[in-house]
Amino acid sequence: MGKVIIIEDNPVYCDYVGNLLAKSGVPSKKYYSLQAAKKALLNVEPDDIILSDLRFPDGDGIELLRQLRDSGHRNPFFIMTDYDEVPTAVRSMKSGATDYVSKRMLEDELLPVLHNLWRQQEQKIQKQDRIYERESEAFRNIHHRVRLVAPTDMSVLILGENGTGKDHIARKIHEQSTRSDKPYVALDCSVLTPSLAASILFGHEKGAFTGADGSKSGYFMEADGGTLFLDEVGNLPLEVQQMLLRAIQNRTYRPLGGNRDITADVRIVAATNENLETAIEEKRFRRDLYYRLREFIIEVPPLKECREDILPLADYFLGRMNESLKKSVKGFDAGSRKMLLDYRWPGNVRELKQVVQTAVLMASEGLVTSETLELKIDNTAADTDLALTDENMQRERIIKALRQAGGNKRQAARLLGISPPTLYKKMEQYNIL
């Protein structure tokens, strides 16, 4: 994930956007004038995202966009608009803008838009470079269950801790289905705000709510004929759960502010790291929706329960990191291989990949050693995982997870096995800055 480059000549609003991103662990760089931005964008990084105001005293964002495209940069470019600028913003998309975001609704719209973009980028990379096919007994069973359910239209619920690869299982279901030539659309429900969740899923008509300056299609329309993957589905607001249940049962939905139903030929694959039966008891999740989603269940075990997969996965990631980092590391020495096997991997496969990436960067060539691996086995013996089970230890565990994740809140949430919104609430509760 790169940084978000914010270009806005109103310093107060520019700082507001930067602070909004910082609260979610998203790095940003701010420029308060068009001229400063023009110079900076000459050396923009490939994975940076541009978020620009439309109007400036000495020009406009479309001019900046054209300069960026003319220089050969294909970075995602989003225009921030006021109400009366929407027609111009729409025209900017013909010049190569990715989308526009309403300033009035920025707090609700921006993060879902960014997370959707990052997920699409991840999916593109995954399509080009398939994940290692694990051969443990547990995953041979998972592959068998995927082959059984993929050709059907049954809804699938994938259960497992964060970082276990539930998204890869969802994509495999789609690719082995009769819908494989149709869209595969993924949505991270943990970043949806209650006020806009229904609009993002089902779309809205102009004037449906304050700030709805035009009509927009939702994820259901985007996934028509294909598969919609709802990651962290337990975070959906209750009122949206009712709408999702209706869409699954009737295969129709109605956009917010619309006056007619739209047919929805969408196959639902959902995933969660949460115990939804507990959420049902706590009145946070609908029992009828739960049974609709769990027509077929696939449980993904944590990496610590699939020890035979650890070394093959580490070797696979080492090869990928050698290529991406332009290094020539030959493998792992005996001590580092023992450490890999002894570690309990609270962050699962995602953490293993990050550890190997750091080790390859540190070693550069030769073999990865215990020192370049940078794993603290003694800590894992005392802490079998980072789950928030003891209220008296929650604050310490959150601080530890944030430290381990280098301050990245989404990464820390994954280590803790909770959703990012839950982590933000806990941080506010315990006054963790």
Image: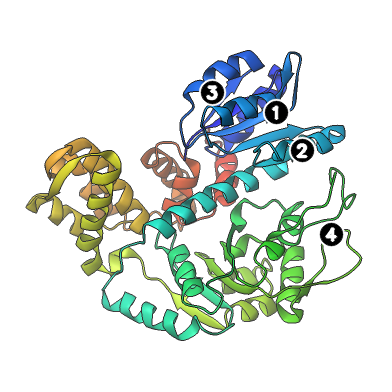
Question: Could you say which disc has been placed on residue 341 in the image?
Answer: none
The residue at the point 26 percent across, 73 percent down is 135
**Mark 1 → mark 3, Cα distance in angstroms:** 14 Å
In this image, 154 relative to 162: left or right?
right
Question: Could you say which disc has been placed on residue 91 in the image?
Answer: 2
- Which label lies toward us, 3 or 4? 3
- What is the x, y in percent for residue 303? 31, 64
Question: Could you say which disc has been placed on residue 256 in the image?
Answer: 4
Q: Secondary structure at mark 3?
A: helix
Q: For the view shown, which residue lies furthest in the front direction?
A: 70
Contact flag, marks 2 and 1 (Cβ < 8 Å): yes
Find disc 3 in the rendering and name its residue. 41
In terms of depth relative to the viewer, which is nearer, 66 or 402? 66
In terms of depth relative to the viewer, which is nearer, 79 or 138? 79
Above/below status of 24 relative to 42: below
In this image, 137 relative to 221: left or right?
left
Please report whichever mark, 2 or 3, sits nearer to the chain's N-terminal start.
3
Find disc 1 in the rendering and name its residue. 62
Please report whichever mark, 2 or 1, sits nearer to the chain's N-terminal start.
1
- Which label lies toward us, 1 or 4? 1
- What is the x, y in percent for residue 266? 66, 73
